[in-house]
Amino acid sequence: MRITALPLSVLLVATASAPDTVRIAPPYIDAPEMAVRRATPHGTVHSFIMHSRDSRIFPGIRQLDNAVTQRRDAYGNRIAAPADEESEAAPYRREVLVYIPAGYRHGTEAPLLVVQDGRDYAVRVAAALDSLIAAHRVPPIVAVMIQSGGGDAQGSERGLEYDTVSGRYAEFVEREVLPQVTALYAVRFTRNPSLRATMGGSSGASAAFAMAWFHPEWYGKVLSYSGTFVNQASPVDPSTPRGAWDFHARLIPDSPRKPIRMWMEVGSKDLHWQDPEPTYHNWPMANDRMAAALEAKGYDYRYVVAENAAHVDGNVIAQTLPGALEWLWRHDTTGSKR
């Protein structure tokens, strides 16, 4: 076993068998980069609303509450149902927050970080980027933080966007969200995928990985907290019948290595941590296997297991987010094309 010092004011223990896996333990303490300091230049955060009526890719659904959708297995997991029994057409509105770093010159190409469930992370992402950019530890990144269309899990708009194993959500971001950001704030984004990242927690994390997996020409970096690499997709796609579980069970092992760099975390007491494999719904097991699949194919990844941490644990995020961003952008601090 070796001890690796990272810029988090904590020691991360890396196992000898998997040197890209580290374990952290309580007490979880906010990284110093998360503190707001007057002397640090601060970016600005803007906000606008997108409506379902304006989307050709996601026109809107909502989850039904009926005898079919209330069914659960012995472990409390939803039992798959036909799509038309799980949801119905319905409108939504979503907020999009945009962090623009201090000193950004309008019209110049910027590195990009897309954040799912954006409002949940906006304050932390802005604080971390302010500190890291000022210290030249990451380039001047623009963060586009997007709320889902609402609901959660099978049959919901959020579930459709985040749990679907396809490139559809990435195409929504690229074709419908980013052009609005450019039009409203005169921000241009680099086309270099090695300077474009996507981030999320839970289903937002599996969506982040799907964005890079299906569109590596757009996204080369992924940041995942408590990734939902489990069977939660609806409607069921015959090509990936176990939903995001198929990423580590089949898609990664059976495909050539893609140019993706990934930082990922899971709590040891994450969701359904005691469920057996046949449920395909054990978060720590799924993330362990995701890391193993990445390791076997030679991916550039870092896997953090947070002892006694829960699902998308806020204390863990506050401790690790600056270091995760810096690790993803190592060697990419200038923002220039490589």
Image (cartoon, grey):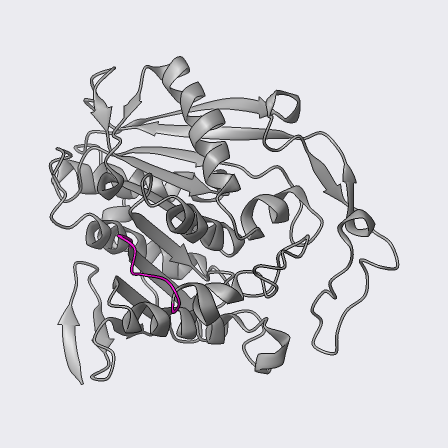
Decide if residue 197 is in sight here. Answer: yes
Residue farthest right in this picture: 67
Residue drawn at (48%, 55%) of the image? 206
The quadrant in which residue 158 appears is top right
Foreground: 252 or 337?
252
Residue 289 placed where, x, y %?
42, 74
Decide if residue 275 is in sight here. Answer: no
| 258 is within the stretch colored magenta | yes
Residue 126 placed where, x, y %?
33, 37
Residue 163 placed where, x, y %?
57, 52
The quadrant in which residue 110 appears is top left
- Residue 171 versus residue 283 in the image, above or below: above
Foreground: 256 or 64?
256
The quadrant in which residue 237 appears is bottom right
Residue drawn at (28%, 28%) of the image? 43
Magenta part of the chain: 253-260
Decide if residue 177 is on the left or right side of residue 31: right
